[in-house]
Amino acid sequence: MWFRNLQAYRITGGNITLNRLEEALSQHALQPCMQMEMQSRGWMVPREEQENFVHAFGQQWLTALGIEKKLLPAGVINQHAKTRLTQIEQMQGYKPGKKQVRDIKEATIIELLPRAFTQRHKTYAWIDAIKNRLVIDTAGAHKADEFVEVLIKSVHDLTLAPLETQISPSSAMTRWLSGDDLPSIFTIDRDCELQGMNDEKATVKYTHHVLDAEETARHIRAGKKVIKLAMTWNNKISFVLHDNLQLRRITPLDILKESAESTEELFESDFAIMTGELSQLITDIIEALGGEDHS
């Protein structure tokens, strides 16, 4: 299993051990939505074949947050509410007022909730207990915030802070495309996005396009900054670095082992390789951006 996106946090406080984390997550396991609940949140086992809520490989720990939501489309609610409002209008001889319409919609939701279908999804994260990092596999800020919120509620003395660097990713990427030396362990690929810094935020995107230094420099001189840049690390992993320090479209390049005899062995092997390589990738990115900002 490989993460496709990285949102990284620094663990700033809390005495986390594997046993304590396992106990805390098991006490906040995902429960099915109650009849009148729209959503339920809780921890799931990362692998259905195992019973533990934390999958551990040494000091690298994999966790999974489960979200169960009721599916109640607005169109269905409106259709049922409209039928009831029509009946009320016929009974009372005039159109319902705003408050009456609002009350009918709320009553319709309450009526439909027990019959709504449910949908579950998992958000994975790994804790690097050696480097005190939490790394969430998501491209969405909302999902990352949700994961952090539930984790802090589950592990009471845990504190986290977004990973930040001395040099902003946008400034560094803009300098690299302007001709400044890129650390030798990285190479620039063929995708890039530049954005103007004025109110209009004019945007130029390159996709599968050789990035001509003179052409990109012209956009930078015109006042644009780089907000996304496709890169490869150590000839092993390609990714897109975003201006918020998020890594997306992570792709391992010929480093996965396929010699494992079983699904379990393959999972263990992939997790060991992933955590080892991505941990070093994050460290090298932080170094390329001037080191971590602890202020």
Image: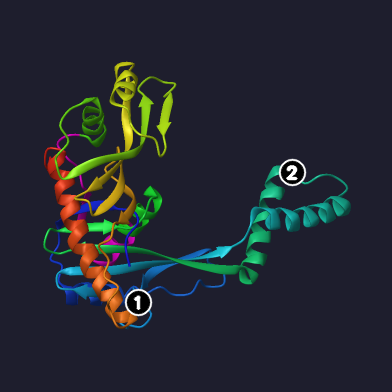
Residue of label 1: 47
**What span is in magenta?**
149-167
Q: Earlier in the sequence, mark 1 or mark 2?
A: 1
The amino acid on which the numbered mark 2 sits, given as a three-letter code, is Gly
User: Is 125 in front, or is 188?
Assistant: 188
Q: Rate crowding at label 1 as few (under 14), some (14 to 19) or many (20 or more) other CA atoms within 10 Å.
A: some
Q: Rate crowding at label 2 as few (under 14), some (14 to 19) or many (20 or more) other CA atoms within 10 Å.
A: few
Q: Is residue 105 visible?
A: yes
| Coordinates of residue 259 in the picture (x, y in percent) | 27, 76
Residue of label 2: 97
Q: Quadrant of the C terminus?
A: top left
Secondary structure found at label 1:
loop
**CB contact under 8 Å: marks 1 and 2:** no
| Coordinates of residue 45 in the picture (x, y in percent) | 34, 76
Kindly indicate the quadrant of the structure image that contains residue 293: top left
User: Is residue 161 part of the magenta span, yes or no?
Assistant: yes
| Coordinates of residue 224 in the picture (x, y in percent) | 33, 23
